């Protein structure tokens, strides 16, 4: 019987669907790197989130694996190229939380444009500053989206009702599925996006190519002062460059659901890296704790989508016996 190890906490629909498909499923959510290598021996498929790095040594130690599933979108914790070289299919489920990310990104943008977080804090402290919190209408702006996969498209779909101009740049996009759903979005070069956008929103995976995508040079290349949104991965943005941009006024505001220093364990502000502290102290930032794709609905959909992909993959790639 095909054996699957689920090595993190996820919605029970994942285990339920895999069992219904006839697989032998085991759930063990508290492994570290070394214990998971030992536990995964002899399994056909492994399901992880982002707690454990699945690198070459891990893959070599588990030769029986035919499939690695990631509950979520980002695959930076898995050496996908090496796994596929070994005949292991790598799967993720960005379809499961794209709607949540699209909605959250719109919420971050509206909060930024209308000073909602700052105004809320001021009112709670007895300050009633109407003129100082005068906002901007989204329909008057041009929004540039970098990365037009599941998340970027979901954001663009929700922007269309606001009447703003939508530009997108994606170096690797070959064609756009269902273009009629995104008829108001215009594909442009990166140079054109930087020349026209008032808002830049990142929706790219974290790779060597995208690490510090937004840096000092990127900010200087932007023609207009702009608002920044990042709901992709924290290291896509160079925190120090962003802090400098905010202080110079070239970056009008930043709304970040992800942070470059996200994995730190800080007990006080003194333990926080200086560039991040500058962001936290800025009145022109809105910060959320990596929850853009973290809804009740997406928890179910992420698991359900991945279950369907695993079932299809394993059924069409049966174990070969000698």
Image (cartoon, helix red, strand yellow):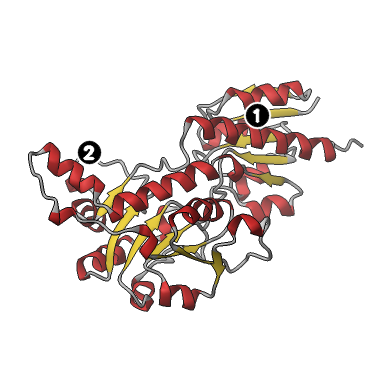
The C terminus sits in image quarter: top right
Q: Residues within 10 Å of mark 1 (few under 14, many from 20)?
A: many
Structural distance between the alpha carbons of marks 1 and 2: 35 Å
Quadrant assignment for the N terminus: top right
Decide which of tag 1 and tag 2 comes sooner along the chain: 1
12 sits left or right of 137 in the view: right
Q: Where in the figure is residue 257, as x and y percent of width and height?
A: 38, 48
Q: Tell me if mark 2 has few (under 14), some (14-19) or many (20+) residues whose alpha carbon lies within 10 angstroms of its own.
A: few
Residue 20, percent from left and from top:
75, 21
Residue located at (43% from left, 51% from top) = 231
Label 2, secondary structure: give it: loop
Hey, which quadrant is residue 43 in on the image?
top right
Q: Residue at x 67, y 54 (%)?
A: 82
- Please say if 296 is above or below 173: above
Q: Quadrant of residue 128?
A: top left
Note whether 238 is above or below 100 in the view shown: below
Given residues 195 and 92, the one toward you in this image is 195
Residue 256 in sight: no
| Residue 306, x across and y down, in percent | 65, 37
The residue singled out by tag 2 in the image is 267
Horizontal and vertical percent position of residue 279:
24, 55
Q: How many labels does the image show?
A: 2
Q: Mark 1 points at which residue?
A: 5
In the figure, is residue 214 to the left or right of 64? left
Regarding mark 1 in the picture, which secondary structure is present there? strand
Q: Viewer-proximal residue, 158 or 121?
A: 158
């Amino acid at each position: 019987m095909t054996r699957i190890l689920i090595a993190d906490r996820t919605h029970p629909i994942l285990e339920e669907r895999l069992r219904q498909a006839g697989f032998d499923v085991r759930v063990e959510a508290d492994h570290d790197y070394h214990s998971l290598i030992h536990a995964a021996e002899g399994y056909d498929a492994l399901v992880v989130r982002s707690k454990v790095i699945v690198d070459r040594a891990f893959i070599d130690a588990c030769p029986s694996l035919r499939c690695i599933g990631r509950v979520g979108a980002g695959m930076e914790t898995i050496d996908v190229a090496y796994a596929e070289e070994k005949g292991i299919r790598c799967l993720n489920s960005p379809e499961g939380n794209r709607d949540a990310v699209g909605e959250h990104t719109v919420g971050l943008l509206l909060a930024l444009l209308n000073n909602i977080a700052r105004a809320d804090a001021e009112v709670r402290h007895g300050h009633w500053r109407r003129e100082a919190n005068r906002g901007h209408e989204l329909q008057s702006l041009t929004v540039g989206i970098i990365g037009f996969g599941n998340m970027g498209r979901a954001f663009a779909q929700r922007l269309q009702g606001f009447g703003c101009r939508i530009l997108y740049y994606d170096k690797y996009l070959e064609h756009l599925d269902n273009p009629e759903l995104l008829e108001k979005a215009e594909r442009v070069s990166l140079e054109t996006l930087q020349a026209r956008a008032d808002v830049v929103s990142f929706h790219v995976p974290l790779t060597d190519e995208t690490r510090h995508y937004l840096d000092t040079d990127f900010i200087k290349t932007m023609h207009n002062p702009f608002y920044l949104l990042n709901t992709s991965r924290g290291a896509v943005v160079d925190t120090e460059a962003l802090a400098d941009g905010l202080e110079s006024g070239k970056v009008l505001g930043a709304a970040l659901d992800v942070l470059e220093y996200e994995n730190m364990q800080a007990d006080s502000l003194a333990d926080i890296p200086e560039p991040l502290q500058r962001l936290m102290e800025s009145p022109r930032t809105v910060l959320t704790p990596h929850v853009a794709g973290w809804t009740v609905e997406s928890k179910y959909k992420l698991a359900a989508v991945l279950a369907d992909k695993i079932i299809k993959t394993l059924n069409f790639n049966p174990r070969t016996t000698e």
